[in-house]
Image: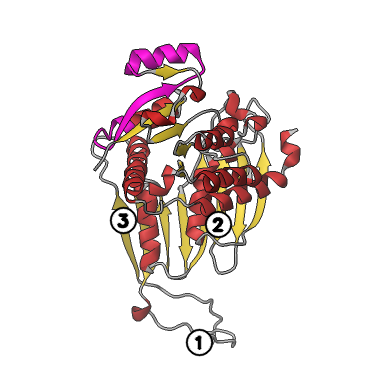
């Protein structure tokens, strides 16, 4: 397969530690030919660490230079503006999340996609996480029955004081890391058209005015209810996933899942009895039965890696492998623009319900 020529904009936590790291691990598929970085000290770092050409501004790039893809890992507040301008200049784009500040701004990005005909991808690599893929496989297999409710708890206890704590910088926990978890929630709901959102936000351990606590309850007709929590003030976080179904339950995280279920064929049918329950002596009884549960587990083959490093790497590599294959074949990408738009609308509704937090 052909190798794609890539330019990376930004050499910070995302451009350097995520995209450069991942792309360098796929040398048969991608070649980073240059970087763009406004910070002089970072430009020196790029030259020292990579030996690649580095530009101060992306406007110095030429669409005639054989660049297949530009990774937009700029500041969050610049993602939409730069992505639109890149496409108008003739480039295909991978945008870091959040793709835009809100649904209205994201629509202007989609307008640019339509007007230019360029390829545009949003870096939602969590969709490719092995643990999430296994969870979806188990749900689809039907062992848990109809899914009633799903909890996603992405919590820790941490103080933060950088630019991503400022709401005006298209930041706060819901826009920083939230796009990944909202994407999970909506995927498990089947990306329903109409999602009812109830959200509570707070500021606990951020120096800026962006939220670092967000609780979202999502509902839609025919879909499981989702309870999504993103917290920087929970020193006792529980399971990342908790899935409750009519036949069983699943719990776990990115690298380990456990689920238990009963088999209907081995279980007496449930029949309503409105009479007061009693035993053979006439004494009152509670509704109790012993269900024969089966329990299974899945543990990722992480080798000598720790679970975080395993998950961080594998989902990113899977994202880029899928992008590369689709780029060459012209097939639709797994993360669709309409799905990102729905995510933007959900996050926008949550922000609208909590305006007082950001003052």
Task: Answer whether residue 152 is visible to the viewer in this image.
Answer: no
Check whether the beta carbons of the residues at disc 3 and disc 1 lie within 8 A of each other.
no
Label 3 secondary element: strand
Badge 1: how crowded within 10 Å, few (<14), some, or many (20+)? few
Residue 11, percent from left and from top: 44, 23
User: Is 43 a magenta residue?
Assistant: yes
User: Is 324 a magenta residue?
Assistant: no
Label 2 secondary element: strand
Q: Is residue 172 above or below residue 52?
A: below
Q: Which residue is mark 2?
A: 226
Which residues, given as a range, are shown in magenta? 23-52
Q: Residue at x 66, y 27 (%)?
A: 208
Closer to the N terminus: mark 1 or mark 2?
A: 2
Q: CA distance from mark 1 to mark 2?
A: 45 Å
Looking at the image, residue 186 sits to the left or right of residue 126; the answer is right
Task: Answer whether residue 107 is visible to the viewer in this image.
Answer: yes
Tell me how many marks there are.
Answer: 3
Q: Residue at x 24, y 43 (%)?
A: 1
Q: CA distance from mark 3 to mark 1?
A: 43 Å
In this view, the residue in front, 175 or 118, is: 118
Where is residue 323, by image quadrant?
top left
Looking at the image, residue 159 sits to the left or right of residue 139; the answer is right
Point out which mark residue 281 bears: 1
Label 1 secondary element: loop
Where is residue 197, by image quadrant?
bottom right
In this view, the residue in front, 353 or 204, is: 353
Q: Which residue is mark 3?
A: 297
Q: Residue at x 35, y 41 (%)?
A: 320
Badge 3: how crowded within 10 Å, few (<14), some, or many (20+)? few
Q: CA distance from mark 3 to mark 2?
A: 23 Å
């Amino acid at each position: 397969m052909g190798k794609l020529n890539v330019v990376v904009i930004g050499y910070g936590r995302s451009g350097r530690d995520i995209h450069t790291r991942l792309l360098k691990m796929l040398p048969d598929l991608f070649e980073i030919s240059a970087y763009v970085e406004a910070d002089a000290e970072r430009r020196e770092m790029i030259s020292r660490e990579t030996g690649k050409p580095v530009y101060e501004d992306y406007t110095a790039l030429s669409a005639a230079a054989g660049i297949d893809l530009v990774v937009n890992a700029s500041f969050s507040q610049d993602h939409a503006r730069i992505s639109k301008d890149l496409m108008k200049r003739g480039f295909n784009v991978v945008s870091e999340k959040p793709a835009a500040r809100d649904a209205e701004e994201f629509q202007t990005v989609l307008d640019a996609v339509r007007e230019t005909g360029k390829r545009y991808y949003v870096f939602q690599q969590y969709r490719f996480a092995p643990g999430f893929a296994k969870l979806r496989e188990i749900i689809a297999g039907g062992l848990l029955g109809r899914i009633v409710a799903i909890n996603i708890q992405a919590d820790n206890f941490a103080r933060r004081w950088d630019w991503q704590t400022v709401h005006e910088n298209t930041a706060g926990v819901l826009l920083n890391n939230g796009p990944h978890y909202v994407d999970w929630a909506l995927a498990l709901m089947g990306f329903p058209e109409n999602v009812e959102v109830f959200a509570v936000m707070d500021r606990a351990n951020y120096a800026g005015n962006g939220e670092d606590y967000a609780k979202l309850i999502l509902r839609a007709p025919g879909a499981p209810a989702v309870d999504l929590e993103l917290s920087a003030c929970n020193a006792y976080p529980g399971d990342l996933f908790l899935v409750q179904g009519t036949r069983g339950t699943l719990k776990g995280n990115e690298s380990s899942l456990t689920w238990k279920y009963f088999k209907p064929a081995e279980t007496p049918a449930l029949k309503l009895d409105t009479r007061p329950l009693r035993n053979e002596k006439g004494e009152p009884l509670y509704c109790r039965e012993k269900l024969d549960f089966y329990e299974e587990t899945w543990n990722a083959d992480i080798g000598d890696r720790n679970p975080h490093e395993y998950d961080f790497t594998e989902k990113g590599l899977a994202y880029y492998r899928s992008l590369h294959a689709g780029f060459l074949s012209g097939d639709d990408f797994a993360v669709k623009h309409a799905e990102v738009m729905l995510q933007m609308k959900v996050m926008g509704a949550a922000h609208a319900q909590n305006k007082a937090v950001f003052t």
